Image (cartoon, helix red, strand yellow):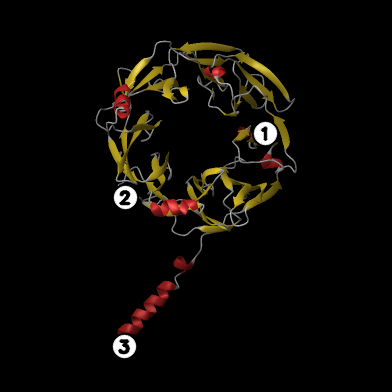
Amino acid sequence: MSKIATITMVLLLTTLASPLLLAKANKLNFNKSQQSSQHKITGKLLYLNEKDGDVDLLIHDDNRFSYYPRISESGLVEQAQIIDIPENAQFFNQATLAKQVGEVIVYLTTNAVMSYNLEDKTISKLIDVDTLYKYQGIFDVNFGDFVHDFNQDGLSDFITHSLDTTHIYLQNATGAFTQQSFAISPRIEKSGRGLSFTPQNFYHADFNHDDKKDIAFQIDDQLMVFAQTPAQLFDHNPMVINLNAHLENKNSKIKKQQGEKSASVKLETVEDINGDGLVDIVTKESVREGMMSRTNHLMIRYGFIENGLMQYKKEADGHATFDGEGMIKFKDVDGDGLKDYYTLSVEMGIGTMMSAMSGAIDMDLRFYKLEKNGKYVKKPVYENEVEIAINSGSDGEALTDVSDFNGDGINDLILKTDDKEFTIYSGAKGKRLFAKRGADYEISLPKSVRTEIKDFNNDGKADILFLYGTHYDEDEEKEVGENKLTLWLSAS
């Protein structure tokens, strides 16, 4: 062997043996508990009283809740308490009420808001309300977005919608409510089954830069803003903000009905993107290219104050694109005060549809950083492939989340690796958002499992709740699996 070849081989072996390359990521410690359930646990989850360093878990199932009290301190109880939902309830949520020690469950019926106290197990009527759902006969109770702290006093307020008006009910320190009504009617759409009514999208943010959150309703390409007053009420006359984003209006709807091509632009988010304390908007225009392919164009408009009101430019301040169909989320991943975005998407094709029939599809996870100049990078700074389970009882579940698992203030990435393992990649500052190597954790992850990532014990570290259900196995031609919960709490 020549001298040059010998040196080359030595360098290669030295590199391969480097501790930096061979070292695995340090594993985090979790305290684990598990409990079987006699009821389905696939419904909506409510977390009550989580500000106290613990949390009460409620799982919705048809016409009842399974209630697990103080899961961080006491663990998962052997048998959940069952809370029956009133027959006349149409929606449920959680609320903070005056003179109540803990949070309560609230129900919206055809004409009232009711509360259920977990401590004394009593139901009380809080207020009479006007709602368009009184015209709907058959109704499966579900989660409803009718609870908000609109005037930021720490107490829950309520919002309902009638045929031509939107109503808010503001709670005060005595537990009484003040009703205000706005001339905002729901969207009306005609179909073969008749007319359907959908409440207008609304946003709760500071649109006049007075450090008080206002209520804004999106009507086509405008925001109708009802400003909060010093008395913690809201003006009856709205201020109008032009979004200049070409959002769908009556003309574009007519063009679509007549078969003409019209841009499909959607308001994706209304929030502070660049960290300057002002409300920004991001719109998404989806363009189909060919039979299957789709390209999504994001347009970012940064808010600025003019004449005491938020304004947006006609020309977008920033642009970004991603391919395929799927979801998009905005989050400050690396803690620099700027909202990055990440997508979980798939290019539809024959291969994808065949994979879906087999029960799972591979989707592309991509992260894009927002730079200090207000522009998103064109190429993803991190990407990976994620398998999404598809079954008859789910729209697709994936163990994919961004949260701080080690308590260092930087978000980490958790990904399902296979049916028996997931990996956590530590977050990092700089161009690369996550470490190249992650720590692997073993646990059964069948198609029927879903996960909740949340800091249940309020220690600054994310915890993991695994919820297992049953699913139909085509090979065995029967339901397999069991209903059970597994809780992993971060440990020091």
The amino acid type of the residue labelled 1 equals: Phe
Q: Nearer the viewer, mark 3 or mark 2?
A: 2
Mark before the other along the chain sequence, 3 or 2: 3
Tell me if I can see residue 205 in this picture. no
Instruction: Tell me which numbered mark, 2 or 1, is placed earlier along the sequence.
Output: 1
The image shows residue 127 at horizontal and vertical percentages of 61, 14
Question: Measured along the vertical axis of the image, is residue 113 above or below residue 278?
Answer: above
Residue type highlighted by circle 3: Ser
Location of mark 2 (residue):
379
Q: Position of residue 279 (x, y in %)?
A: 37, 28
Label 1 element class: strand
The residue to which callout 1 is attached is 65
The answer to whether residue 277 is seen in the rendering is yes
Q: Secondary structure at mark 3?
A: loop
Q: Residue at x 51, y 60 (%)?
A: 25
Q: Quadrant of residue 68?
A: top right
Kindly identify the residue that appears in the image at 38 percent across and 76 percent down. Answer: 12
- From the top left corner, tell me how far across and down residue 325 is, in percent: 39, 44
Amino acid type of the residue tagged 2 in the rendering: Lys
Determine whether the residue tagged by mark 2 lies in a helix, strand or loop. loop
Q: In the picture provided, is 452 more to the left or to the right than 301?
A: right
Are there few (<14), some (14-19), or many (20+) residues within 10 Å of tag 3? few
Q: What residue sits right under mark 3 in the picture?
A: 2
> How far apart, in angstroms, are the residues tagged by discs 2 and 1?
45 Å
Q: Quadrant of residue 192?
A: top left
Q: Is residue 171 above or below residue 256?
A: above
Front of the two marks 2 and 1: 1
Residue at 32% from the left image edge and 83% from the top image edge:
5
